[in-house]
Amino acid sequence: MTRSFWTTDDFEVFSIAGLEKRMNALQTKIQPKFEVIGEHVSMYLSARGTGEFFPHVAKHARRTVNPPNDSWVAFAPAKRGYKALPHFQIGLWGTHLFIILAVIYDNPDKKGIAERLSDDVQVITSLPNDFVISGDHMKPEAFKVDEIGANGVEKLLNRLHSVKKAEFIIGLHVPAERATELSEEAFFLLTEEMIDRLFPIYDVIIGK
């Protein structure tokens, strides 16, 4: 039987009580996998010819009380940070795996990004019906793009344009039970497919 890349134990890390115990489990079970993903996916992104991408594994170093409810490895064309840039993320909540493109609150060009996406909204609405969209990376919930339609997408983009804390998150959520069925090969094939689907949006975001 082919071994799965993700296990049920990986997702159950986020049910462990206490900061120290959960962080220890993250560091021993999940972060080594993020390092593997970081090496593979940064090479795949860099090979697209739009510049070199660097992996950034979330360390949650500023937490002193509350344990993290999710964790990730992010990819951006900068060595020293990613939060102020449009970036890709691959990570876990207790309920699902996510493969996303993100513009979060630190980005200084959110108005310009919102305007560029609004001018080319079909690059979002033409995505397959299993893609989801959100305005807050701190929450696990998201809307299916095909269900909210062009009007719902425009509302999220208008909020991105006008609300300081607004964000733009788009990509795929894979339920934990399905993610644990993916072999390493299948997981990376899915990841590469999602990056290929999301890259036209990334190009619009960066004004390419």
Image: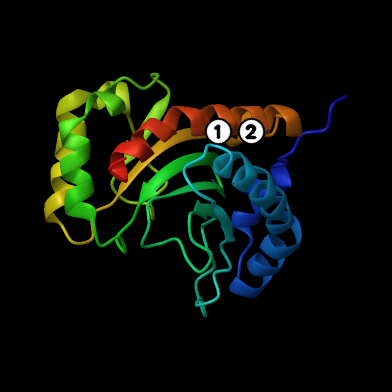
Task: Determine contact: label 1, label 2, CB under 8 Å.
Answer: yes
Name the kind of residue labelled 1 in the image.
Pro
> Could you tell me which quadrant the C terminus lies in?
top left
Q: Position of residue 190 (x, y in %)?
A: 60, 28
Res. 122 in view: yes
Q: Nearer the viewer, residue 114 or 4?
A: 114
Q: Residues within 10 Å of mark 2 (few under 14, many from 20)?
A: many
Image coords of residue 207 (percent x, y):
27, 43
The residue that label 1 is drawn on is: 175
Q: Which residue occupies 56% across, 44% down? A: 46
Query: Residue at 34% of width from left, 35% of height from top?
Result: 201
Q: Secondary structure at mark 2?
A: helix
Residue 166 relative to residue 76: left or right: left
- The colour scheme applied to this rendered structure is rainbow
Query: Which residue appears farthest toward the bottom when viewing the image?
Result: 64
Q: Is residue 98 left or right of residue 120?
A: right
- Rendered image quadrant of residue 184: top right
Q: Nearer the viewer, residue 99 or 78?
A: 78
For the residues marked 1 and 2, what is the alpha-carbon distance in whole angstroms?
Answer: 6 Å
Left/right placement of residue 183 relative to residue 120 reads right
Give the residue at x 38% y 42%: 141
Position of residue 85 relative to residue 173, above or below, is: below
**Local SS, label 1:** strand
Residue beneath disc 2? 179
User: Relative to residue 125, is residue 171 depicted above or below?
Assistant: below
Q: Amino acid at mark 2?
A: Ala
- Asked if residue 142 can be seen in this view, the reply is no
Residue at left 23%, top 47%?
113
